[in-house]
Amino acid sequence: MTDKAELSSTERQLRDALARLVHQKPINRELKQKLKANKLKIVVSNVEKEAGLSNGSARRYPETKALIESAEANRVHGVSNVSDTVAYFGESDRSFRFYPITFSSSFSSLPVLP
């Protein structure tokens, strides 16, 4: 994961905008109206709009786009309760093996709003 100090200005703006949308505190007038109407979705175009950037600005930041997509999934479906370990049944020796799952995107890198 990219350190916060290494983020470009654009990526920092996108992540700050994402944090505002996740915490339901948009500053963009149109997105505030969508929030009041309960129609606000966390999608790339809305994050770009909230950040004050043009359409397609997030295309160079796949990690940030993954954060946006997982934020919307968490909003719609809630946080996953799936274990972080996957069981694999070994055919050769007929035993179970457990492999940890690591996720490349997490919300720990998002700023916390008051």
Image (spheres, rainbow, N blue to C red):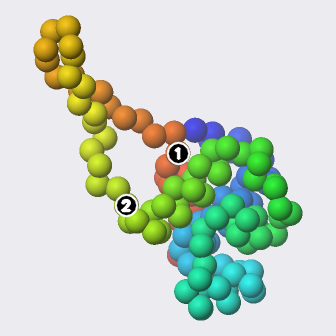
List the residue tagged with mark 1.
Answer: 105
List the residue tagged with mark 2.
Answer: 79
Q: Residue furthest right?
A: 54
Q: Hey, what amino acid is under mark 2?
A: Val
- Using residue 90 as the reference point, say whether residue 106 is left or right of it: right
Towards the viewer: 25 or 114: 25
Q: Secondary structure at mark 1?
A: loop
Alpha-carbon span between mark 2 and mark 1: 14 Å
- Residue visible at 71% across and 41% down in the picture: 6
| Residue 78 in the image: above or below residue 12 | below
- Using residue 114 as the reference point, say whether residue 20 is left or right of it: right
- Residue visible at 77% across and 70% down in the picture: 49
Residue 67: percent from left, percent from top: 57, 53
Residue 64: percent from left, percent from top: 65, 50
- Residue visible at 45% across and 69% down in the picture: 76
* Circle 1 Cα neighbour tier, 10 Å, few/some/many (<14 / 14–19 / ≥20): some
- Residue visible at 77% across and 44% down in the picture: 60
